[in-house]
Image: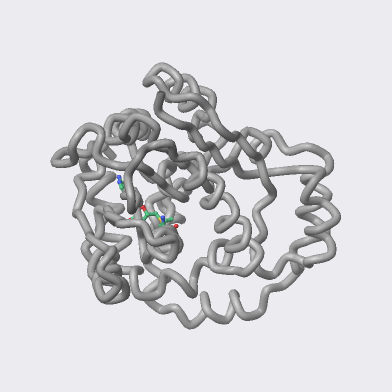
Amino acid sequence: MCDEEQVKFNKEVNDGISDKYDCQHNEIFNPIEQQRLVRALSTAIKAVKTDSKPLSALDYGSGSGNLTRHLIEAGINTVSADVSDGFLNLIERNFSHTGLSKTQKINGKDLTGMETGQFDLVATYSVLHHVPDYMHIVKEMCRVLKTGGVLYIDHEVNESYYQRSQEYLEFLKKARPIINLKRYLRLLFDVKGYKHIVRRLINPRYKREGDIHVWPDDHIEWDKIEQLVIEEGLEIVLKEDYLLYKSGYDVDVYNEYKDKCADERLLIARKQ
Ligand SMILES: C[S@@+](CC[C@H](N)C(=O)[O-])C[C@H]1O[C@@H](n2cnc3c(N)ncnc32)[C@H](O)[C@@H]1O
């Protein structure tokens, strides 16, 4: 698929799942991950060194509003941007009453229409692995930041996700329930989902939500992102690897391993 087709495919798939997104993504909407996210976002907000009051933020690839919700709760004027009309409609329904929420449809390739130096905070969570030219998007995110503004990239797998250590393999074996009955029953009765199973049989790399950088030979290159961010004049404030908690993991096992291995990365950087 060329980049254009990939973005179109992602848009269509995400339009189709927008209403069910929150209940299908328990690796995001669970208390442990939400607490980590709130702490991380608070670090990013405190790192902003612009004079703006209130702050303004861009939530790039906002989905149903996971980041948007926390940004608005922090009193930040938030532009939620996405390729999917389904998600943007949802954001309008859920957040327009706050007076802090705007939505913007984007093309998935660049930030055309957004001004250079427009935002105090530019945040993205679990999005870059869907974007064909994600390096260009990172460059664009740096462009629309004010001097002193902060870039926040979260929930993208790190290198250890692919080069699995003994501890990580041990963790996965111990933490995962052997049979997740609820999940299997949901899949069994999801008649529409059968078309995705057929597509996967035809193309083993097919992913329902259009994930494109999820294979050992095609994954988000964190080292290049970091290099680009520095070249664009930002300084790294925090680079943190963490072990993502997914609902269904045994909490005691998770607590035992969370300081021994990690599979995701958070990067916070400030424009100088
Ligand atoms: C896994 S979801 C993450 C949503 C949200 N950030 C969250 O925290 O739940 C990926 C999001 O990226 C959006 N997306 C997919 N391709 C995109 C692209 N090329 N540019 C911007 N957003 C894209 C999807 O519509 C979807 O909202």
Give me the residue at 76% from left, 68% from top.
178
The part of the image, by quadrant, that contains residue 254 is bottom right
The part of the image, by quadrant, that contains residue 34 is bottom right
> How many numbered circles does the render carry?
0
Residue 201 at x, y = what percent? 46, 55
Seen in the image, is 265 located left or right of residue 235? Answer: right
Give me the residue at 65% from left, 68% from top.
247
Give me the residue at 53% from left, 28% from top.
236
Residue 206 at x, y = what percent? 42, 50
The quadrant in which the N terminus is found is: top left
Q: In the image shown, does 255 or 215 lie closer to the viewer?
A: 255
* 79 lies above or below 169: below
Q: In the image shown, does 15 or 34 lie closer to the viewer?
A: 34
- Toward the top, the furthest residue is 231
The part of the image, by quadrant, that contains residue 69 is bottom left
* 64 lies above or below 222: below
Q: In the image shown, does 224 or 226 lie closer to the viewer?
A: 226
Seen in the image, is 34 located left or right of residue 232? Answer: right
Residue 220 at x, y = what percent? 49, 34
Q: In the image shown, does 11 or 96 lie closer to the viewer?
A: 96
